[in-house]
Amino acid sequence: MKGLAGWLLGGRLVPLFIKELTQLGRNRRLVVMLIVPPTIQLLLFGVALNPEVTDLRIAIVDESRTPQSRDLVSAFAESGSFLIPVQYASTDASTKALTDGLADASLVIPRDFAERRVRGETAAIQLVLDATNANTAAIAGGYAARIVEAYNRRLAGQAPAPARPLALSTTVTLLYNPGLQNSWFITTGLIGTLLVLIGSIVASGSLVVEKETGTIEQLLMTPASATEIIIAKMLPLLLLLTADIAVALTVARIVFAVPMRGSLALFASAGMLCVFAGIGIGTFVATFTRSQQQAQLMAFFVNPPVAMLSGVVTPIEAMPEWIRPFTWINPVRHFATISRGVMLKGVGLDVLYPNVLMLLGISMVLVLVSAWRFRKQFG
Amino acid sequence: MKRVLAQSRKEVRQVSRDRLVLFMALVLPQLLLALFGTALSLTVEDVPIVIQDLDQTAFSRAYADAWRQTLTFHVVELAPAAQPVDALDSGEARAAVVIPQHFERDAIRGIPADVQILVDATDANTANVLRGNAFGVSQSFVRQVRTRMAPLVRQDVRLWYNPGRDSKKFVGPGAFAVTLALFPPLLAALAMSREGEQKTILQVYASSISAHEYLMGKTLAYMTIATAQWAIGVAVLRFLFGMWFVGDPTPFLLGTVAYLFCSVAFGVMVGAAIPNQAAAIQAVQIVGFLLSFLLSGLIFPISNIPVGIRWISSFVPARYYIELARDAFVRGGGWSATWHIPIVLALIGLVFFVRAWVKMRRMQVPA
């Protein structure tokens, strides 16, 4: 133990560490890069990715033209989910409106609508949804079902015969995010994506610069070993990027009012593990490249899968089954689960330990493999 | 014209020799397209739910079975003594159905029995879809049980253009447009800024080629490469996504030429303005990718973007091309639905090109 402490504190590590820290501190562009892009991306993603389905444009073909049919049309108009319905003379015209993208849905009320209703028979209406966007269509269909349901209930109430009340009512309670704020979902996950991506860019950048300018040879000529050099490279980055966790958290809390219901310490440690994973990826990439521009192009191979197969923007449950196991080796996926658990659900380590352990394992493997490759290249 | 062709021939040959760039031009976009098409879906299936049956009667079990029969949900067992909220806390289930005591008795007497459904709303969109599905399950159960109480108004829903609600049909054309907004400008910007960085641009100045010929040569070369990427992309859409043109493809083909011009011209503009390859890559990434990804209606409709930043999307070419591709591959509206798009794209491209030209012309010494 004494040997390890002596090696850590008394040896060459401390001066190297100080050298790296001063170098990073002098780099103004780096400081800007740590603050500006994550802030902008959090804001853009949080604001722009809004799944709300409102203001649906509905085309109406009223073949019945009776008070009863107009009553139904106004039920759609008053719901708030649809814009003021636009009347079309024929189904041909409404079909054209749908094909040209001028309407999202069309409602056809058949000629015998009023007669059937007066006779107490079931009157069928036809709702056509533009399902190009499957998600919007699913939600719009749900809205229409609720409108027709409420309409039926109202008619049942008006009926002269003692109408049976519906024997079942359904109350839906939305937990954790009752306002259905998508920004809460996006930002809590995106913080992890940003930490990994920025960590990898900065780490590969700081190594590749030394390779490009040839100063890495000078470092290797000093008595310091390759291991010491790589540790001294990584630690200051870890320190610096921890500040990014604070930046991202501030944006999420202040701009989007994301709650913090659980332990901040757990969130911060998961964030640091994420940064560590990012540094590991960056160092790994750096050992394969000779110039900054090459390192950046390499990132095009690494970043998209890390960002997409994480459940940050779209739910993992919506991915095909065969691809879901791959999300398990993605650090961002585990961070997203942890941060959503801590911030929104308020759960602790007792629930999240599998994700914390996985995140720890992934980042350790990444750092060790990249350090090993670095040593092999230069040691 | 001869100089333009010579310039672009040289450029294409240069690209075909660089294996990393060639890979990025032709293979990587398709990998990304496949990745987006698989990962960017909002249609959830097999969502785990728990059911807490406090009634334990034949009727309540029949109701629980109604949940088991859906494709959207899949019922996982709730550990005895565990509360439904625990299952949501731990993430084992995304929703919980609580059937109250006296469910059967009340239902038969016609007293509304209140079924409670708890939904994990961490993911707002999925929660919204699940909420709609939950109403649907209860309604169809009521309809099944009380056949004699037929509703007065019944809605028959038809899903057009994408009856299977396959989200690939929505994301596929969009992702196709985004890959074309990323890689062609990236390569063009790299080629332009490399000449600036390595100072080979000075040789161009010294030669007899004029600014517009030089830029046209570059644009033509990268449009050729982008066309190859486009053609492979269409094949990927055909064979991996099962999509093909519905209706008249001419507006799409014409719009494609305008879009590729737009894309490449943007890269040329960035490359002319930033004589540093690393910085040019970042600029293309941020503008070309981030804006095309977020402000183009790729995942959620543009009308949902707050008004304050929605206007930006009017200047994002991908937004128009996504509309055009969705029409060509899914809706089939043809010219009457999309006549304006090729024009808008060509105009935006022209603006990019002219800006690049102004920049280059200023630097060139008059002959």
Image (spheres, rainbow, N blue to C red):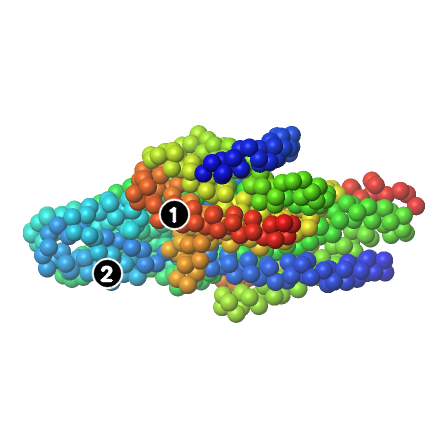
Q: In this rendering, would A15 be left or right of B118?
A: right
Q: Residue at (69%, 54%) from the top-left corner?
A: B187
Taking depth in this image into account, of A293 and A370 the one nearest to the observer is: A370
**Residue A152 percent across, percent down from the top left:** 22, 51
Mark 1 and mark 2 in contact (Cβ < 8 Å)?
A: no
Q: Label 2: chain?
A: B
**Residue B362 percent across, percent down from the top left:** 82, 40
The kind of residue on which mark 2 rests is: Arg
Q: Which residue is mark 2?
A: B68
Q: Residue at (8%, 49%) from the top-left corner?
A: B102
Q: Which residue is mark 1?
A: A357
Q: Which mark is residue B162?
A: none
The kind of residue on which mark 1 rests is: Leu
Q: Residue at (90%, 43%) from the top-left corner?
A: B366
Q: In this rendering, would A308 be left or right of A349?
A: right
Up-down: is A109 above or below B82?
below
Neighbour tally class for label 1: few under 14, some 14-19, many 20 plus, Cα within 10 Å: few
**Residue B22 percent across, percent down from the top left:** 68, 61
Q: Residue at (85%, 60%) from the top-left corner?
A: B2
Q: CA distance from mark 2 to mark 1?
A: 33 Å
Neighbour tally class for label 2: few under 14, some 14-19, many 20 plus, Cα within 10 Å: some
Q: Label 1: chain?
A: A
One can see residue B65 in this view: yes
Element under disc 2: helix
Q: In this rendering, would B265 be left or right of A347?
A: right
Taking depth in this image into account, of A132 and A297 the one nearest to the observer is: A297
Element under disc 1: helix
